[in-house]
Amino acid sequence: MLIGADGAWSKVRPLLSDARPAYTGISFVEADLHEAARRHPGAVDLIGGGFFLALAGERGFLAHQEPDGSIHVYAAVRAAEDWLAGAGPAELRAGALAAFDGWSDALRALLADADGELTLRRIHALPVGHRWEHVPGVTLLGDAAHLMSPFAGEGANLAMQDGAELALALTAHPGDSGPRCAPTSRRCSSAPRSPPGSRRTACGRCSAPTRWARCWRCSPATGPSRAEARRASDRLVAMDDSTAPAPAADANGPPSPRSPTGASWTRRSA
C-alpha cells in the first residue's frame, strides 16, 4: 500500500487528485532571536512566556518563546504571491520592515534585530473538504491530504489523527495485501478530512482553546497600554476582520471589541 504522507507538495497526491495547493493571499516572514533573555531582553518583555499576537488590518506579528530560550517570530502580511520574490537577505529584511512602517519600534525590532537570515514563506492551502476517488492501494494523510493555513494550529494534530485512523484500518484487516488492500484504501480515501478545522483556517481565524494571560487593544504605532486592557474572547480574528463573525464571549469575560483602526495585542500563556 502506498501512503502519501509527503507534505504540502506531495508527489503521491497526483495519483489520486488533480487538486493543487493554492496561495491563500498571506505570506509569512519567519525570524529567530537567539539567547533572547541575554541578547534581546526587550523582546522577552514584549512576548512574555506564552503566545503573542499583534494584529492590525491585513498585517500582524505572531511570536512565542522556544524551550531553548530563543524567540520564534512570524510577521504575516496579506500580499501578492510575488511579494519580495527573488529578494536577497538584505532586501527581504528591508521589505518586511517596510510592510510595518508606522508600527511601534518594539514590534519592528522583532524583524530588525533578528539573528541570521529571514525566511519568506507563502501560505498555501488545499480546497476545504478535499476528497478523491478511490484508487486501490493508495491513500494520503496529513498535509498531503488536507493542507490548511496555520491559524487554527490543527495541522500536526490532524496528521497524527490520520496516522492513527490509518493504523486502525490496517490492523483491522491484516490479510489485505496487493490488490486485496482495496477495502482499506477505500475507507481511507472516503474518510472526512476535518472540514470544520479547514473552514476555520480558511476564514483566517484562530479558535483553539487557551488560557489568556494579557490582552491589549491599542494602535500599532504605540506600545501596549494597560489602561486599554480588554478581556479576551476565545476567538481571535487573525487576518481578515471583514469576513469573520464577531468573537463570542468565553469564561474569561465578554468579547474584546474590534477597533477599526487599532491593533489587537494578545499575549497568552501555554
Image (cartoon, rainbow, N blue to C red):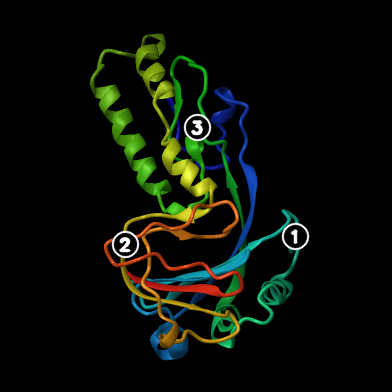
Towards the viewer: 168 or 46: 46
Towards the viewer: 177 or 87: 87
Q: Amino acid at mark 3?
A: Gly
Q: Amino acid at mark 2?
A: Thr
Q: Earlier along the polypeptide chain: callout 1 or callout 3?
A: 1
Residue 203 x %, y % = 53, 49
Q: Residue at x 72, y 72 (%)?
A: 95
Residue 221 x %, y % = 60, 84
Q: Which residue is mark 1?
A: 85
Image position of 176 (left or right of 189): left
Q: CA distance from mark 2 to mark 3?
A: 26 Å
Mark 3 Cα within 10 Å, few/some/many (few <14, many 20+)? some
Q: Which residue is mark 3?
A: 129
- Check contact, mark 1 vs mark 2: CB within 8 A: no
Q: Which residue is mark 2?
A: 210
Which quadrant holds the N terminus?
top left
Q: Residue at x 44, y 23 (%)?
A: 189
Residue 88 x %, y % = 73, 69
Residue 57 x %, y % = 62, 66
Image position of 41 (left or right of 79): left
Image position of 67 (left or right of 22): left
Towards the viewer: 84 or 152: 152
Q: Earlier along the polypeptide chain: callout 2 or callout 3?
A: 3
| Residue 252 placement: quadrant | bottom left
| Residue 68 placement: quadrant | bottom left
- Asked if 41 appears above or below 134 in the picture, the reply is below
Query: Which element carries disc 3, helix, strand or loop?
Result: loop
